[in-house]
Image (tube, grey):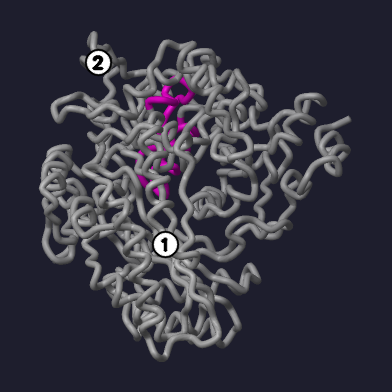
Amino acid sequence: MNLKEKIEKHLMEVQKPSRYIGGEVGSIVKDKASTDVSFAFCFPDTYDIGMSHIGMKILYSLINSRENFRCERCYAPDVDFEKIMRENDIPLYSLESLEPVRDFDFIGFTMQYELSYTNVLNMLDLAGIPIFAKDRTSELTQIVAAGGPCVCNPEPLADFFDLFILGEGEEVNLELMELFNEMKKQGADRLEFLRKAAQIEGIYVPRFYNFSYKADGTIEKMTVTDNAPTKITKRIIKDFDNVFYPENFVVPFTEIVHDRVSVEVLRGCIRGCRFCQAGFIYRPFREKSPDTIYNETKCLCENTGYDEVSLASLSTSDHSQIDEMLTKLIDYTAAERINLSLPSLRVDNFTEELLEKIKKVRKSGLTFAAEGGTQRLRDVINKNVTEEEIMSTCKIAFEGGYSSVKLYFMMGLPTETDEDIIGIAELAQRILDLYYSIENRPKGRSPQISVSCATFVPKPFTPFQFEPQDTRAEIERKQKLLLDSVKSKKIKVSYHDSDVSQLEAVLAKGDRRLCDVVYTAWQMGCRFDSWSEHFKFGTWLEAFEKCGVDPAFYANRKAEYDEILPWDHLDYMVTKEFFIRENKTAHTAVTTPNCRQKCSGCGVNKAAGRDCFC
């Protein structure tokens, strides 16, 4: 029985069998014999999640646009199908050709969130590929690579990967595959290829970097071998308006999380919120022209048949030509009866004119990120949003016919006090009172103020990378305080599991000593840690204890400014000196202007060789 027959025999025994068979409209199937280099693009979560990821769509189409390169998709099997795979000797395989992943030249993972780490190990094991890089053959095959936001600190995964790709992949992925093709023809081995790959800007090969530690557990020094660079600088796309973008997406048979066309309108962020990793690692700020956005939207809708479009960015309303962009898009989408989704709107540039445009395409509630419950705390985190702006935005929304507003907040932020927590409930109450004070508010509808409260996770490459996370007990105390402070049933509060946030902080700030912990946790049954029904925090704690590692050292300890951090050898173009300066400023509750108003000297313009704003 061949592999396809084995798979088809068991498809009706699992939920959503269409996740596992391929053949979707828009998928690209190439003849193996006619290509030189193969790339298995792996997403370490379910098909439903991975198929929604825009970066994977871009690189899948880009690699396949090269005649001699072949890229195929692979997702983590859910637990029901994993059981069948292991019982019936079905290896992890790609969806396009149903070929075992172990037969590909590159096995590439996109690392979007820390709680997917155990899934990487599980997928390698299902593929029959040695989990530790040191155990793989010396032959030039099965190069296990990773990119994505989590590789800004890849050290907790360093023992499992041959190389990491820092920054934006549209150019460097092709350069890496070209090098592989050239060296394969020369008969090179794995080590020779990795030495050459390490010389490509943006490629980090962890085997060439070794760390020693002080008695207190902090890093003493890093040593470099094999002539590898001492600093690895991320890659960026300079001409973003003309960067490659797919003309087609793979259209799934089954419903996925974001089942629609996504069009990237800008990269980077001008705001500088001190907790936000994405706002710094995606700098410099770049945007596409309204014409480019319109053309990409129209092309994708026509080619895929989707009737919904989402504009992807960190802050859509910061586009310098948002009015022109939305006018062009709404004229098209309204005429074609296509829904247009506008996430990532800011409180401080929300206008009646923007609302009128939104009302033409969006009927549900509006969502805004206030982040802090008091003005002092919003200044600490550099949110640069005033209560007056929050109230003004809600007033515009209520007068415009909306009766529900969702507000995002964060709990456990540096310098936070109980007054800041109580301030979340009080702000929500003032917004509710505002609704009832408006004469021309929507009639016959009950208002709903939703408060969603995430736990602060200190992240690398932010001004708060030095900060400790609140302990589990303290977060749970603050969550209760918030609930007790809400006085109306029309204010609905939700918050994140503190255990999940604790593990996320450990993995985000961890060093290479966590590799054994991740491996041990996986061996003990951890996988799909971002899913509440699968998350086993007790098992993780056992793994930490078994490996002699204290999670509090990473999550709940304040780092010194002169301390060597696990990611200090990686250059994301924003300087450590800037992060130190911003951290000190945060503790004085003083804000820093956004990049359009004044350059804050983060260093990205010098590193990128271009002005961010003139």
Residue 431 image point, x, y percent: 36, 71
Dot 1 or dot 2: first in sequence order is: 2
Q: Nearer the viewer, residue 608 or 536?
A: 536
Residue 313 image point, x, y percent: 39, 61
Residue behind mark 1: 487
* Mark 1 vs mark 2: in front: 1
Check disc 2 and give the amino acid type.
Thr
Residue 331 image point, x, y percent: 48, 87
Q: Residues within 10 Å of mark 1 (few under 14, many from 20)?
A: few
Residue sitting at x 25%, y 45% = 416
What's the mark number on residue 223?
A: 2
Question: Where, by quadrant of the figure, is residue 529 drawn?
Answer: top right
Question: Where, by quadrant of the figure, is residue 594 drawn?
Answer: bottom left
Tag 2, which secondary structure? strand
Side of 495 relative to 375 (left or right): right
Q: For the magenta stretch, what is the residue range?
A: 155-182
Q: Quadrant of the N terminus?
A: top right
Distance CA(mark 1)–CA(mark 2): 57 Å
